Image (cartoon, rainbow, N blue to C red):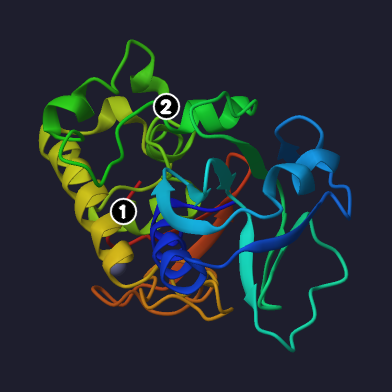
C-alpha cells in the first residue's frame, strides 16, 4: 500500500527509468496473496502486456498508473527495478521482464491493487475507481472551499486521524503521512473534529497542502523505499524512526500508540489532547 508522496516519486522514477522498455513477458499472481486485487484473471496478464512498450507513469492518489502502449497498470504495491544481473524475490505478485533483461517486480505487503486494463476501459477494481474520483490534494482543485465539502453531519464525532486517513476522504492520504500533517497543525490524532477551533481547521488544511507538497518535493518519506530500494529524502518527524526521540520543536519524547487499526505517533507537548 502506497501513499501519495511515494506514488509521485515512484511515477517519476518509472518514467525516467522504464520509458521505452518493451515487455517480453509478464507473470502475475506467481505467489497468490489474499489481498492482491487483479483485473479479471491474472493468468491473462501476459497476453495483455507482452510486446507492449512502457511510455510513462503518473501518480493517482496512492497508486502509480503505468502506461504501456494501450494498456494501463494501476499499482499500489511495493515496486522494485531489477537490473540485468538481479534476481527477483522468491515471492512476488507481478513481474514484468523487459527485452533488455531488466525487470520490474511488484510485491504486496498488507494489501495492494495490481489492476491491468485497456486504456479507457473499466479497471475492474473498485478501490481504484474510488481512489481516482476526488481531486488530488496536490491539485489546485483541492482548495479551502473543496476542503469544506469534506465535512458532513457525522464529521464532528470522528477523530482527526479518522477524518484525514480513512474512507479515502482524501485520495492518497493514509495513516503514514497523516502523522506529520497532524503534528504540523498541533492537533492530537485522537482529538474529535467537533472540538477543533476554526483556526485549527485552517491550520489542518494548510498542513495537508504543505506537508504533502514537501514530502513529494523530497522524493517520499524516509520510512519508505523507492524504485531502487532507497529511502525517500523527506525526514519524518513522527514515525517508527523517531519513537521516544525528542520532538524537534519542544523536546517532549515522541510517543507511539495503537489506535483505529494502525499506529499513531504524537508529541504530547505540541499536540495536547
Ligand atoms: Zn513537540
Q: Tag on residue 158?
A: 2
In screen coordinates, is 227 left or right of 158? right
Among the 4 quarters of the image, the one containing residue 123: top right
Q: In which quarter of the image is residue 205?
A: top left
Name of the residue lying farthest toward the bottom = 85
Residue 181: which disc? 1
Q: Residue 190 at x, y = what percent?
A: 43, 41
Whole-percent x, y for residue 117 in the image:
61, 35
Label 2: which secondary element: loop
Mark 1 residue element: helix
Left or right, 256 with respect to 216, comes to right
Question: What residue do we see at 37% from left, 35% from top?
Answer: 170
At horizontal 52% and vertical 69% (from top left) the residue drawn is 18
Q: Position of residue 183 (x, y in %)?
A: 31, 57
Q: In this view, does 7 lie above or below 42?
A: below
Name the residue nearer the viewer: 139 or 179: 139
Callout in the foreground (1, 2): 1
When the figure is inspected, residue 1 is found, relative to residue 270, above or below; the finding is above
Amino acid at each position: 500500500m502506497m501513499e501519495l508522496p511515494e506514488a509521485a516519486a515512484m511515477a517519476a522514477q518509472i518514467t525516467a527509468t522504464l520509458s521505452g522498455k518493451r515487455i517480453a513477458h509478464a507473470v502475475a499472481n506467481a505467489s497468490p496473496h489474499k489481498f492482491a486485487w487483479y483485473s479479471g484473471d491474472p493468468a491473462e496478464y501476459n497476453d495483455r502486456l507482452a510486446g507492449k512498450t512502457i511510455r510513462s507513469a503518473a501518480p493517482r492518489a496512492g497508486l502509480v498508473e503505468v502506461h504501456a502502449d494501450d494498456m494501463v497498470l494501476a499499482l499500489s504495491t511495493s515496486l522494485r527495478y531489477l537490473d540485468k544481473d538481479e534476481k527477483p524475490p522468491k515471492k512476488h505478485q507481478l513481474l514484468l521482464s523487459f527485452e533488455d533483461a531488466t525487470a520490474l517486480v511488484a510485491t504486496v505487503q498488507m494489501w495492494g491493487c495490481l489492476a491491468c486494463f485497456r486504456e479507457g476501459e473499466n479497471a475492474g477494481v473498485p478501490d481504484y475507481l474510488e481512489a481516482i474520483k476526488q481531486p488530488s490534494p496536490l491539485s489546485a482543485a483541492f482548495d479551502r472551499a473543496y476542503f469544506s465539502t469534506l465535512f458532513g453531519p457525522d464529521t464532528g464525532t470522528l477523530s482527526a486521524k479518522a477524518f484525514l486517513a480513512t474512507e479515502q476522504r482524501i485520495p492518497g492520504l493514509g495513516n503514514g503521512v497523516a502523522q506529520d500533517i497532524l503534528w504540523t497543525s498541533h492537533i492530537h490524532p485522537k482529538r474529535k473534529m467537533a472540538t477543533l477551533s476554526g483556526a485549527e481547521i485552517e491550520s489542518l488544511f494548510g498542513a495537508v497542502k504543505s506537508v504533502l507538497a514537501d514530502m513529494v518535493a523530497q522524493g517520499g518519506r524516509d520510512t519508505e523505499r523507492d524504485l531502487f530500494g532507497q529511502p525517500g529524502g523527506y525526514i519524518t518527524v513522527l514515525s517508527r524512526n523517531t519513537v521516544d526521540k525528542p520532538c524537534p520543536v519542544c523536546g517532549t519524547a515522541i510517543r507511539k500508540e495503537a489506535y483505529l487499526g494502525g499506529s499513531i505517533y504524537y508529541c504530547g507537548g505540541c499536540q495536547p489532547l
